[in-house]
């Protein structure tokens, strides 16, 4: 499954490709070591069935981890 990732203000963060589908409340870590929680999944196809939009909030970033 391929996802477009946006923040709560609908600003584009990037894209994510996952083998296992994500659900609301799930967390994932990007290649940049930022951890996000899924707030909403927009399943509107917009012409493509394999792409969904995730609204996320960052719960931990790489700078926080480096300080610990």
Image (cartoon, helix red, strand yellow):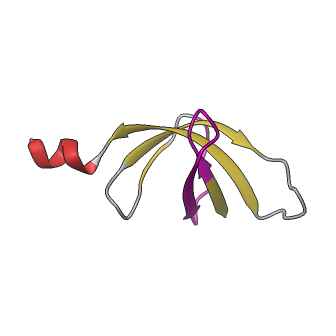
Residue 37 horizontal/vertical position (percent): 48, 38
19 or 56, which lies in front?
56
Most distant residue in the left direction: 68
Most distant residue in the right direction: 47
Q: How many marks?
A: 0
Q: Is residue 65 magenta?
A: no
Give the dominant element type of the magenta stretch: helix, strand or loop: loop
From this view, report whether residue 25 is shown above or below residue 30.
above
Residue 29 horizontal/vertical position (percent): 39, 54
Which range of residues does the magenta coloring cover?
5-24
| Residue 32 horizontal side relative to residue 40, left or right | left
| Residue 54 horizontal side relative to residue 60, left or right | right
Q: Residue at x 34, y 61 (%)?
A: 32
| Residue 59 horizontal side relative to residue 46, left or right | left
Q: Quadrant of the N terminus?
A: bottom right
Residue 61 horizontal/vertical position (percent): 30, 45
From this view, report whether residue 16 is shown above or below residue 24.
below
Name the image quarter holding residue 52: bottom right
Name the image quarter holding residue 67: top left
Q: Quadrant of the C terminus?
A: top left
Q: Is residue 9 magenta?
A: yes
Q: Residue at x 53, y 34 (%)?
A: 25
Residue 35 horizontal/vertical position (percent): 37, 46
From this view, report whether residue 56 is shown above or below residue 19.
above
Q: Residue at x 77, y 64 (%)?
A: 50
């Amino acid at each position: 499954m391929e996802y477009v990732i946006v923040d709560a203000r609908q600003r584009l963060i990037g894209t994510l490709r996952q083998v296992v589908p994500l659900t609301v409340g799930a967390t994932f870590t990007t290649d940049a070591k930022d951890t996000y929680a899924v707030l909403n999944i927009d399943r509107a196809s917009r012409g493509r069935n394999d792409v969904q939009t995730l609204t996320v909030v960052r719960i931990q970033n790489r700078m926080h981890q480096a300080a610990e």
